[in-house]
Amino acid sequence: MAKSAEALINHELLVWARKNAGLNLDEASKKASVSAERLASWERGETRPTINQLRKLAQAYNRPIAVFYLPNPPKDFQPLRDYRRLTAVPRERESPGLLLEVRRAWSRREIALDLCKDLDEEPPHFPITTSPTDDPEAVALNIRHDLGITREIQAGFGGRHKAFNWWRDSLENKGILVFQATAVDVSEMRGFSLADRPLPVVVVNIKDSPLARIFSMLHEFVHVAIRQGGICDLDELGHRHPVEQQLEVFCNRVAGAVLIPEKALFEEGLVTAHPSGLTTWSDEEIASLARHYWVSNEVLLRRLVICGLTTREFYQEKRAQYAARRKPSDKGFAPPAQMAISAAGHAFVRLVLDNYYRENITSSDVADFLNIRLKHLSEIEKKVIGHSVLFGAVA
């Protein structure tokens, strides 16, 4: 009986959910296994879907079914500023995957703020601010000091993933939620940020290489410090409005200097031994210097250009070579519990678990907030307990 019962919902919710999912009528109808004509009829309010059909729509739009029973469409997040294109150029439609990741980041931040209240705790204060008019090298040194990174710590990372985890933990310790997007291609998005405070958000693409994610993370960190979040592609050669271009160049410059301070670079043995006036570098020299800092070859080359140790022409030549032989990131299978932690971050997971242990939320809430099945909860607990970053350890 329930399957054939009509869903007594406001038809405007169907239009709102579809558009916010980034789907047109034909795309939505295919995902929900219904004809476009029938879906259009539901959206006009001429007919209603059954409860079973509504479940399929909720799944297609990545929305809980309860949202369709609201009296009116909710006010969603404001569209993010897009630094990827000239504002005068008509934008291509964002993919459903990107829209989902932005919604998810926005929703998790709201959840985190509520969970802080449930714990009677003030959200951590993000203390770092800067301006695009500041000296990027000086800003970078201040950020390194605030994050507690030293040359010795950096040299001792011992691996790409360990390096990424250190930088991620250091940002979370400063009051930033760092998430990893899993549903969007790197060609569309490498990083974005929500600069609202408290609890600003940085999101990087888990499909990118770990070293590329580190740079994206720090680039977005600078956006947060400037209080101007948005969607970035980190390409300084892109066609943007001059003001936006200047901002992206500044964020890139600071991120690169955080990873490779100018003074440290000039003190490198390979640099001091390099023949004066020679602006070319061998692949072995580039790779060796990049390993010293656990950065990509491209980041290292960009720093060589900025520090006057090579030419932009040489950088562009090598950049084209790297792009031609670039390989996708590791695509090994990750267990569901590990994927949930990687996507949400230890700070958010700890906050959820703290509330769960104090009986502020249920196990079903935990599964919903972390986008997991309940059977994986015990494994998440094993991996996260004892890893305290943004909030204190559970008593």
Image: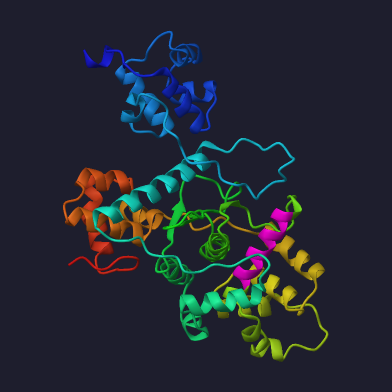
Can the viewer see residue 113?
Answer: yes
The answer to whether 275 appears left or right of 253 in the picture is: right
Q: Position of residue 181 (x, y in %)?
A: 47, 50
In the rendered picture of this protein, how many numbered marks are placed on residues?
0
- Residue 245 within the segment the image draws in magenta: yes
Q: Residue at x 74, y 73 (%)?
A: 305
Check the image and report above or below for 297 versus 123: below
Q: Which of the 4 quarters of the picture holds residue 179? A: bottom left
Q: Whole-percent x and y of residue 172? A: 41, 65
Q: Which residues are magenta?
A: 243-256
Residue 231, image x, y percentages: 58, 50
Q: Is residue 290 visible?
A: no
29 to 201, vertically: above or below? above
Q: At which x and y percent is residue 177?
A: 42, 58
Please determine whether, in this image, residue 85 is positioned above or below residue 34: below
Q: Does the magenta stretch mainly form a helix, a strand or a loop?
A: helix
Is 215 placed left or right of 286 in the picture?
left
**Residue at image coords 47%, 40%:** 100
Q: Is residue 347 left or right of residue 150?
A: left
